[in-house]
Amino acid sequence: MTQILEIRDLKALAKRRVPKLFFDYADSGAWTEGTYRANEEDFAKIKLRQRVLVDMSNRSLETTMIGQKVSMPVALAPTGLTGMQHADGEMLAAQAAEVFGVPFTLSTMSICSIEDVASVTTKPFWFQLYVMREREFVLNLIDRAKAAKCSALVLTLDLQILGQRHKDLRNGLSAPPRMTPKHLWQMATRPGWCMKMLGTNRRTFRNIVGHAKSVTDLSSLGAWTTEQFDPQLSWKDVEWIKERWGGPLILKGILDPEDAKMAAKTGADAIIVSNHGGRQLDGAPSSISMLPRIVDAVGHQIEVHLDGGIRSGQDVLKAIALGAQGTFIGRPFLYGLGAMGKEGVTLALDIIRKEMDITMALCGKRSITDVSRDILTE
Ligand code: FNR
């Protein structure tokens, strides 16, 4: 087996181990995937400033995200269907994040439920909320996250309607996954994945099934999901959600300084500069290219985080240098999970940590909290 040294190696391994329709689900963007590509490519355009003969000993990557201590400024982003990359995916990823000392964020659209994840972790995790039209379901979800002692609510704002991803349409991906002969063949050629999946189907979309009014079983889930994203979601909704939740609130999916100013006014604790990993508005700019303007607009009022395109510790460092307090990774941990389960998530985090540490040292900094725009150059 090739040595695994970078996130790309985990991606290649995941591609060999995860059935095509689920691997493609992770590795896809909306329409031409231009924004998906730009998220990664724009990081490469940012140049780091090499320094020499400064004390590079005793380095630390420790910092805080929304006031909570983290071993490095990298959280696992909420990703739907994570349990299809690997059996019990959300539970394993949460455990890996806990050991590593970074936040794990559970998606509303996860395979394992809030309670499943709470049952295998000892520290609080974060919960991501989609606001569905069925408000009773949303209120109940908030209460379940509170009962599970989640320590932050990540409210996603950029999915009032669902972006279109060609790969998913071509693969015939649906929720719940429909099994056609093509899909069965894709699974049969990934026996390791299948073996692990056997016996875990009782944990499918458990945040929703049995909790939403009309979703009593998996067969009713698909129709419910498509008509439930709320195109009328507004800033007013953020207010009642904030009130009902009553804890730390992070607004995810901000890509414009004007929206960032609106978000800051809500009194939320943080925003995530994000275009949903290029999965929603194709043609939108990359997250990293918008970060400086958003930090300049609201950085003095609200904590600013970023996700989209981070594939290395260098990318994290660049985001921190441009004013992010923390970052989120989606696909890098999904590739780790698909490649090697919990160990793969740990490896993804470890690769990023090492890259960040070495890069920070070579830029002449000893603490992540001292990193600023002065580590960048033309
Ligand atoms: C996502 N994302 C996402 N976001 C969210 O708020 N709720 C969700 O359920 C999902 N689901 C989801 C599934 C998959 C497969 C991916 C790749 C992404 C978006 C995610 O939280 C994050 O914004 C991006 O993944 C960040 O980009 P990178 O790190 O994947 O490049």
Image (cartoon, helix red, strand yellow):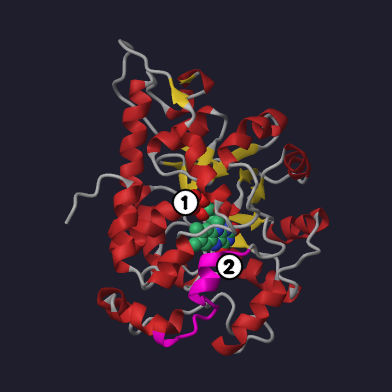
> How far apart are the alpha carbons under marks 2 and 1?
16 Å
Question: Position of 82 compared to 157: left or right?
Answer: left
The residue singled out by tag 2 in the image is 108
Q: Is mark 1 within 8 Å of ligand 1?
A: no
- Point out the stretch of residues depicted in magenta: 164-181
Question: Position of 68 compared to 22: left or right?
Answer: right
Residue 161 position within the rendered picture, expressed as x and y whole percent measured from the top left: 70, 64
Q: Earlier in the sequence, mark 2 or mark 1?
A: 1
Return the residue found at the far top: 53
Q: Is the magenta region chiefly helix, strand or loop?
A: loop
Q: 285 or 89: which is nearer to us?
A: 285
Tell me which amino acid carries mark 2: Thr
Q: Residue at x 51, y 23 (%)?
A: 372
Residue 178 falls within the magenta-colored stretch: yes
Residue 79 position within the rendered picture, expressed as x and y whole percent measured from the top left: 51, 61
Q: Quadrant of residue 67?
A: top right
- The local secondary structure at tag 2 comes to loop
Q: Residues within 10 Å of mark 2 (few under 14, many from 20)?
A: many
Residue 327's tag is: none
- The local secondary structure at tag 1 comes to loop
Tell me which amino acid carries mark 1: Pro
363 is higher (above) or lower (below) than 6 = above
Residue 99 position within the rendered picture, expressed as x and y whole percent measured from the top left: 34, 53
Residue 128 position within the rendered picture, expressed as x and y whole percent measured from the top left: 59, 60
180 is higher (above) or lower (below) than 366 = below
Q: Is residue 105 visible?
A: no
Residue 103's tag is: 1
Q: Is residue 32 visible?
A: yes
